[in-house]
Image (cartoon, helix red, strand yellow):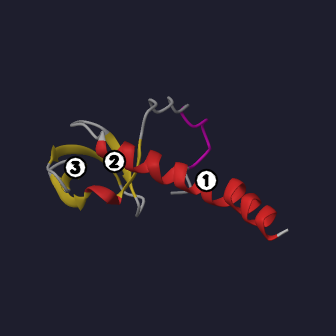
Amino acid sequence: MIVALFVLLWLLVLRPQRRRQTEQLRMQDTLQLGNEVITAGGIRGYVRQLDEEVLKVEIAPDVVVRLDRRAVAAVVRDEPEELEPLAQGERSES
């Protein structure tokens, strides 16, 4: 019974978690100049310089921050969609 519970735990929790960790490390190791990235803190920017463990990310024009390579949560792969102009009378909430 205990062995069956361990196998179930391994199949449902440990194996998928290990796969996600491996994919995350692979993504962080294959970063390239110019990639648009999202950090663990939610900041978006473009990779401008790569070193072994540190990279520089431009988050605004002429604003470059140094980040640990492991702080990158995702690489943005797709192009942003075109936004439709607001109809007359509609206002932005931001």
Q: Residues within 10 Å of mark 1 (few under 14, many from 20)?
A: few
Q: Is residue 90 left or right of residue 4?
A: left
**Mark 3 to mark 1 CA distance (whole Å):** 35 Å
Q: Is residue 62 left or right of residue 78?
A: left
- Mark 3 lies on a secondary structure that is strand
**Mark 2 to mark 1 CA distance (whole Å):** 20 Å
Is residue 38 located in the magenta-colored stretch of the structure? no
User: Residue 68 falls in which quadrant of the image?
Assistant: bottom left
**Amino acid type of disc 3?**
Glu
Q: Residues within 10 Å of mark 3 (few under 14, many from 20)?
A: some
Percent position of residue 24, x then y: 43, 49
Question: Which is nearer the N-term, disc 3 or disc 1?
Answer: 1
Residue at 44% x, 29% y: name it. Answer: 79
- Mark 2 lies on a secondary structure that is helix
Magenta stretch, residue numbers = 85-91
**Amino acid type of disc 1?**
Arg
> What numbered label is drawn on residue 28?
2
**Mark 2 to mark 3 CA distance (whole Å):** 17 Å
The quarter in which the N terminus is drawn is: bottom right
User: Residue 69 falls in which quadrant of the image?
Assistant: bottom left
> What numbered label is drawn on residue 15?
1
